[in-house]
Amino acid sequence: MSSSRDLILGRVRDALAALPKRAPLPEWDPAGARSTVAPSGADLWQAFSARLRAVNGTPLASVAELVALLESKGWRHGYCDPTLWPALKAAFPAGFTVETEFDRSRVDDYQFGITVADGAIAETGTLVLSDRGTASRLAALAPWVHVAAIRHAQIVPDLGSALTLLGDDPNVIWVTGPSKTADVEGILIEGVHGPGMQVALLLD
Amino acid sequence: MASDRLLPRADRRVMLMATCLCDAFYADAARATVEVLEHLGCVVEFPEGQTCCGQPAFNGGDWPASRQVVRHTVKTFAGDLPVIIPSGSCAAMLTHGAPLEFENEPDLGEVRELGRRTWELADFIVNGLGVKTWPGRFDSRIAFHRSCHCRGSETGPAAFALLSSIAGATVVPFGEADQCCGFGGTFAVSFPHVSTAMGTLKLEHIRASSPDVLVSVDMSCLMHMGGLAEKAGQPIRTLHVAQILRDALRNGNLL
Amino acid sequence: MARQPIDQFVERIASEKRASVYLGTKTTHEKREKLLHDHYADPDALRRLAGGIKQHVVENLDTYLPRVEAKLKANGAQVHWAATAEEACATVHGIMTARGATKIVKAKTMVSEEIGLAEYLGSRGIESLETDLGEFIVQIDHDHPSHIVRPIIHKSRREIAKSFEREGLGDYNDDPGTITRRARAFLRKKFLQADVGITGANFVSAESGRLVIVTNEGNSRFSLAATKCHIALIGIEKVVPRDRDLGLFLNLLARSATAQQLTVYTEFISGPKSPAQPDGPEEMHVIFVDNQRTEVLASECREILRCIRCGACMNVCPVYRQASGHAYRSVYPGPVGAVLSPLLAGERFAEKADLPKASSLCGACNEVCPVDIPIPDLLLRLRDKGKREHAPLASAGTPSLGGWAVMASKPVLWKTALSAGKLMNLLPANWIPMAAAKAWTDTRTLPTWRGGEFRSWMKHRPAKGEGKGKS
């Protein structure tokens, strides 16, 4: 309602009119917010993997490792982004059912979902998902295991750099490990509404 | 910065604000303050018209009453001498609280001026007079309670440094040392259950480190914790930092 | 002398509840301290910087709000303005009605609690289901959250297990993992059946018009993957100037709130879903909520609008630890709530005028605040306001200090009272705070009265050079 808008903005203006001067915007160097665990070396995948493990995420350097992990848990029914599947298909033996279209009416059929990430942040072990790059939001979220596929060149060192890459995508999600809660007596439980296992799969 | 506040050696005249608590209950803490300052070469003036810094009413929300008392204090301590106070909370009242409640008052300038030359005692010794270590002897396990109004000031580190430097003294750490003891001015009587719970918890932590004496720059905290301990049948010895410093000098035959 | 409600609450609180709250807050606080100091050489400098940026925003909302609105609209979101709680609820209802929608899944937003959204919608046949595990449990118990980040910090697993059994979510089982998995299964269906997802926003960037939402559970993501319409309720103070400033706030927020480097999910939402995306909202509504915030802006406590709702203040507050959030009778408890809740009450300030008194002014809250809000100063201002407006809850339990003020501004009276020993014999009865004296001596002894001793010593001691008392 434009009248509420005008009312509120009018009140804001009136409230601030009495101030003799307005507090200026402090300038600051993004390097100042870099933590001591931001990477110092050139191997961003190593740095990223270490931080991902620190939040109980699972960095994997090959599809073969992914398949071995899934098989070891008996997770053989999942989803994969159709643009990615041709490259991964060969590594998946018979016995796996991998759909390339996510059917939300059977959401609990999928034990894993493999989607394409836009990038990663080494400082925090974070995967960056975008709306345009994620073939199905539910596929990246609902299955117990989410596998986000990334390439070396996509890994940035820290939060500050990642913020410059948001672009104009309507829904960028920074994913830092598996979903969790500590609501019940402060006890950490993984796998709440989102995945209980968060995998980062290095493609190159 | 601490080093910017160093007083020139030549001028050591100071005024003492003894605090209303020392005036009423803790005469020896005030005496010790005078003896310590004189030992350091200060000439201590005691304006007899002094009463209270105005904090009880300020904290209690009665700013007009508080301002009335602050105005009297400003008059009593007129001049340009440093005002030394054996209390972190009274010092904070004059440096921060009073300017806050005088924000819209015409005499804000005078109130600020007094605040600028106000010092808590330990801060004055270390940063005003440049004395970093203390002579003499005091054989004791000391639990040092850094009172809340010292937050953001140099007092805590100053008192800790002085106490730690005394021969024979061991300053013992204890759990949750940053948590408030529960005095809080009128809070102690307006919220007696909360205040008592906070103080009792604090005493548990302190006792767990087996100190011989509980020490602070604020008698208010010691009055509260000491009073709780005594009422509960487990009295604990309490002393103001000034008393420790004075007694250390006596024990070392320096006073 | 009437008693302070929060003190009475503390007297009555079940020791199990107090113990839960104490352990929960202390643990998080200590982890937060360690993490900030492990990760940064000077965390206090970052807090002050963040405080400076937020203060700038607060003092320039007249510029920032129109800018944010324009950006959001350009991104494809519809922007609404709600001056009151009622209007915010009505706006949500209007959107639901226009869509013929009856089912909402809600991620955690304190603003929705503030405006009483669930009750408003419930009485109009609309289900608004909490999806944050803690808030879900609060909802099924018809309870209130007691902490803005850890809503069920006061509940034990046994209580939760009983509630789940009562709600038909399975036989009694108090294993936290089982409880969580049951909630996952139950709420998953609800997400997929819902029409609309409601969230809040932790920040809104004025540069890009992006909402930033941080969660750990994935409930906000699920709402925005499963439903076709997104409604975001946002207080007008949540703006940050630039995307780059988010680097500072995001680094501080999770560390301050839950002692994490980052929450598991940080969502940057600038509009409805992209055209090719099968999942998610086709429609996005942002409702900017005033609900007395402009009054706070006009007051001398506007610094409280910097708050980024991390909860660090209540984790360190010794009063909160003894009392728990319910003692504050408000959506926002603890130190931030003691300032914000009375102010958000507007004309009903008097009903909350005791909250600013429930503090020893220790200052621990300011020391942990990621935006450096001078909370003790604001509490003091509100105490002054409570007294000036003669709010009974402000003066409950507080001795009248008028008599003291007279004595303390007349040295002759003061010195006479000191020397006379027993104050009580000398002063008019209404100058002696009897109730206050009793409140002290119930649990504490009083020290020996030594009025006049020091002054006498000072006056009569042998001259030490020039050091003698000056009258």
Image (cartoon, helix red, strand yellow):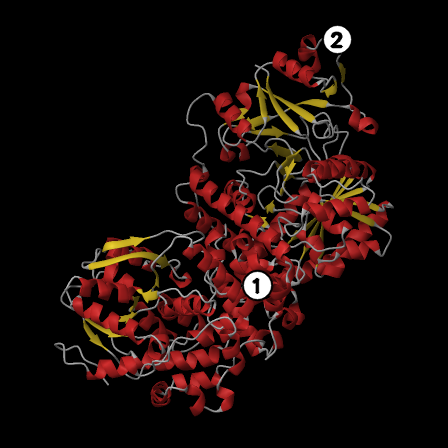
Where is residue A75 shown, x and y percent of the image? 72, 19
Image height of B210 relative to B47, above or below:
above
Crowd rating for badge 1 (residues with CA inside 10 Å; few <14, some 14–19, many 20+) = many
- The residue to which callout 1 is attached is C339
Q: Residues within 10 Å of mark 2 (few under 14, many from 20)?
A: few
Which residue in the protein does label 2 denote?
A: A94
- Which quadrant is the N terminus of chain A positioned in? bottom right
Q: Nearer the viewer, mark 2 or mark 1?
A: 2
Q: Residue at x 71, y 53 (%)?
A: C112
Asked whether B144 or B133 is in front, the reply is: B144
Q: Is residue B212 left or right of residue C389?
A: left
Q: Position of residue C117 (x, y in %)?
A: 76, 55
Q: Badge 1 sits on which subunit?
A: C
Q: Amino acid at mark 1?
A: Val
Q: Nearer the viewer, residue A129 or C436?
A: C436
**Residue at 17% across, 63% down:** B8
Marks 2/1: CA distance? 63 Å
User: Residue C194, image x and y in percent?
Assistant: 81, 41
- Secondary structure beneath disc 1? helix
Quadrant in which the C terminus of chain A appears: top right
Q: Which x, y percent locates residue C125?
A: 87, 52
Look at label 2 and name its amino acid. Ala
Q: Chain of mark 2?
A: A
Q: Are marks 2 and 1 in contact (CB under 8 Å)?
A: no
State whether residue A168 appears in this view.
no
